[in-house]
Image (cartoon, rainbow, N blue to C red):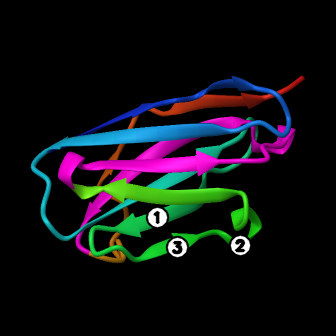
Amino acid sequence: QVQLVESGGGLVQPGGSLRLSCAASGRIVSRNTMGWHRQAPGKQRELVAYITSGGTTVLVDSMKGRFTISTNNAKNTVYLQMNSLKPEDTAVYYCSYCSGYGCYDGWHYWGQGTQVTVSS
């Protein structure tokens, strides 16, 4: 089992920034992939970004230039730095984990989610 705990969500004004953190614990393998997804009210969950323990990163095109994903492998923690936030970024943000690279058989574990609200 792998446990994922997100933190860093909250209320921010348009144009502001937030940094989300996701700490993984449990049976973590050295080759893994961790990701961030989000789900806005009434919409499906969508991928935001993911990063492998080898350092490969993938960021959804619509968020490039505003969001950055990074990791501290020693702490088994992944971060999502979000800048220039817009009201449409309002969503519950979820952390995910899979063993190996690519997650071709899906994400194996999910966090509980952290709410991000962008509003004036």
Expressed as whole percent of the image width and height from the top left, the position of residue 55 reads: 35, 73
Is tag 3's residue or tag 1's residue first in the polypeptide sequence? 1
- Judging depth in this view, the residue of 75 and 37 nearest the camera is 75
Q: Which residue position is annotated with label 2?
A: 61
Q: What residue type is labelled 3?
A: Val
Tally the numbered discs. Answer: 3
Q: Check whether the beta carbons of the residues at disc 3 and disc 1 lie within 8 A of each other.
A: yes
Residue 53, percent from left and from top: 27, 68
Give percent across and percent down for residue 39: 64, 43
Amino acid carrying mark 1 in the image: Tyr
Please give the name of the residue rendered at 36% of the width and 60% of the height, measured from the top-left corner.
107
Q: Residue 50 carries which label?
A: 1
Q: Is residue 113 left or right of residue 3?
A: right
At horizontal 82% and vertical 28% (from top left) the residue drawn is 13
Q: Residues within 10 Å of mark 2 (few under 14, many from 20)?
A: few
In which quadrant will I find the C terminus?
A: top right
Would you identify the image quadrant in which residue 91 lies?
Answer: top right
